[in-house]
Amino acid sequence: MTPRRVALLKGGPSLERQVSLRSAARVEDALERLGIEFVSIDVGRTLVDDLRASDADVAFVALHGRGGEDGTVQELLEIVGIPYTGSGVLACMRCMDKVLTKHMLLEEGLPTPDFFAFSEIAFKELGAGEALPAIEERLGFPVVVKPAAQGSALGIKFARAAEDVPEALIAAFSYDDRVLLERHVEGRELAVSVLEDEGEPRALPVVEAKPEQQYFYDFEARYEIGKTEFLCPADLPGDVAARAHELAVAVYRLLGCYGFARVDMILGDDGLQVLEAQAIPGLTDTSLLPQAAEAADITFEQLVEKMLEQALARTPASATAG
């Protein structure tokens, strides 16, 4: 099913605005090559009016960060009655909240690094700071300190010793009012994208990210060309690759994703562990979903076309749930 006219949602006010604009630029080029009519909308206060004026029969969500991949814009699209690419409201909310994701992983028995989380209120008003020594003892060092709801590695800090924790917490709290302290696992950074094919989630080839002279795969390493070497398919034993695929599909189903998603993992001495999931993965030149699709002989234009077909095929129930 080919859309008549696409509303391409991009930009927005989030901290990941520039990443969104880069993703959208690639989608715009693809839509032009596909001969599909579209209107680009820089998301802001006039979004509902812009959508109604667009005369679009489907929306392509190329937004990242808060407001774009946390279920907010998805709720508005459902109110306006325009089908859209990617996961629905609930799945977006689950994926955006790293703490919720990790609790769901634990409940399902899926491997994820040990962690603790608390809010800024708990830290400032309930004495959570006094629990830090016990947390540090149980997690060990280094500890990864993350905002609970941010993407693109924004606000992530490594605390190599106890004296590094306060500064890392301040950095994380500057992005969110809830933080996640996670045991650092030394290993290989892997990502497995999932793309639905006739309603069934299919894991694409595993991508390995090898940052150049970086302690971890940070914002700069993710989006600045030349900062990271990407291997796709990753050089993995057959059983490890199969397990990565199995885990990715399990996480995709658990979080209720729809159409496509990306699951990030670490391969350490204890095997594969799931870090988080992205309901709306980036589509930039350095993003991992397009690389995985290409390794599976799916061109970027075909990927965009498939995303639109999925959006048009979705039902109201699948939109709300996933």
Image (spheres, grey):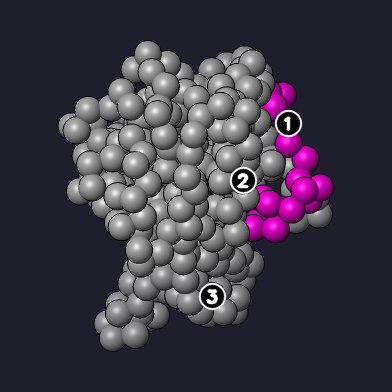
Foreground residue among 95 and 37: 37
Q: Considering only vertical position in the picture, is 281 above or below 232?
A: below
The residue at which mark 3 appears reads as 171
Residue 13, horizontal then vertical, whole percent: 46, 66
Residue 225, horizontal then vertical, whole percent: 77, 48
Residue 184, horizontal then vertical, whole percent: 57, 54
Give the residue drawn at x 47%, y 71%. Answer: 175
**Mark 3 or mark 2, whichever is nearer to me:** 2
Mark earlier in primary sequence (3, 2): 2
Q: Which residues are magenta?
A: 215-236
Foreground residue among 169 and 77: 77
Q: Quadrant of the N terminus?
A: top left
- Residue 244 appears in view: no
- Residue 121 appears in view: yes
Give the residue drawn at x 43%, y 37%. Answer: 6
Whether 232 is among the magenta residues is yes
Tell me where residue 134 sits by quadrant.
bottom left
**Mark 1 or mark 2, whichever is nearer to me:** 2
Q: Residues within 10 Å of mark 3 (few under 14, many from 20)?
A: some
Tell me where residue 208 sits by quadrant.
top right
Q: How many marks?
A: 3
Name the amino acid, label 2. Answer: Ala
Name the amino acid, label 3. Answer: Ala
Q: Residues within 10 Å of mark 1 (few under 14, many from 20)?
A: some
Q: Secondary structure at mark 1?
A: strand
The residue at which mark 1 appears reads as 231
